[in-house]
Amino acid sequence: MTQAITLDSAYATCRAIAKREAKNFYYAFVALPEPRRNAICAIYAFMRKADDLSDDESIPRGQRLLNLEQWQAAWRSASQTGATHDPVFMAVHDATQRFNIPLSLLDELIAGTTSDLKTNPGDAPDTYATFADLYQYCYLVASVVGLVCIRIFGYTDPAAEKLAEETGVAFQLTNILRDVSEDAERGRVYLPLEDLAAHNVKLDSILHRAKTTPPTPNERALLADIGARAEAYYASAAKLLPLIDRESRPALWVLVKIYRGLLKRIRRADYDVFSHRISVPTFQKLEILAVGMARLAVARLSP
């Protein structure tokens, strides 16, 4: 007989997934009050499962898409009835009700996960023609997460929604810059084709290159343009911060500090994202988290 899952154990499962997998995100999660931290970890675990189903390259694209559709159908059933043996579904169902998260946002999150499986099937590389196309992709895979997060963080001014959308785009553009080499190995180039053409960079030069080959001047200029777009969107994060609940601000501050720090490191490396993977060292993340926790303590003491 299968032992019933409790809500506490369901959230504990999600916290364990987030701690193991979330890397940059987890440092921000720690700086949240417990009920909000639990909800964010549940959303992250949900997102992680969708990503894992999408990214398992040992399975053909068509089968991965089918697996995701079946998983989404199971989630929809759980979200409607509350009856599930899946600890992640149980925790997410509770979080959506507790923080009034529209289920349509989770549908969009899954749509973002499946978008890579629906573009250019077969041997053709995954590409985006224009920045507008890339922005829509960033919206689905990152901005939607931001729109879910601010509902957990708490806000009243509707202006927070557009700012959260643009903050998500800033994060995703930073990820795209960091992962250019790894994505190319998987046949994915997120740098818009119109930008490659504008900088006279050939698609094949991104897709097929030795890992130790540094970027050419044209490639550096291309990547710098993407970096400048990301930096512009980080301005929205500064405007978003005062619009969310006081106890949630330290978590967002930690997340922005880490991701913007990653962008600065990429810039200091003169956009050489091919020779090695650029990251923010753990000790610096812990320093940022310590400041975030101090900010949380102050927020709790403030009237």
Image (spheres, grey):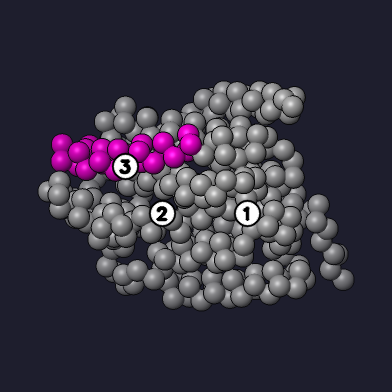
Res. 92 visible in picture = no
- Judge from the rendering whether residue 100 lies leftward or rightward of residue 288; answer left or right: right
- Image point (56%, 26%), residue name: 288
Local crowd size for mark 2, using a 10 Å CA cut-off: few (<14), some (14–19), many (≥20): many
Q: CA distance from mark 2 to mark 1?
A: 18 Å
Residue 95 image offset from top left, x and y in percent: 71, 55
Of callouts 3 and 2, the N-terminal one: 2
Whether the magenta-drawn stretch holds residue 217 is answered as: yes
Local crowd size for mark 3, using a 10 Å CA cut-off: few (<14), some (14–19), many (≥20): some
**What amino acid is at disc 1?**
Ile
User: Measured along the vertical axis of the image, is residue 110 above or below residue 20?
Assistant: below
Residue 140 image offset from top left, x and y in percent: 46, 59
Main structural element of the magenta stretch: helix, strand or loop? helix
Residue 187 image offset from top left, x and y in percent: 31, 59
Specify the quadrant that holds the N terminus: bottom right
Q: Residue furthest left?
A: 200
**What amino acid is at disc 2?**
Cys
The residue wearing badge 2 is 138
Residue 43 numbered mark, or none = 1
- Image point (74%, 55%), residue name: 98
Label 1: which secondary element: helix
Label 2: which secondary element: helix
Q: Which residues are magenta?
A: 214-239
Q: Quarter of the image holding residue 133?
A: bottom left
Local crowd size for mark 1, using a 10 Å CA cut-off: few (<14), some (14–19), many (≥20): many
- Image point (43%, 33%), residue name: 260
Residue 286 image offset from top left, x and y in percent: 58, 27
The residue wearing badge 3 is 229
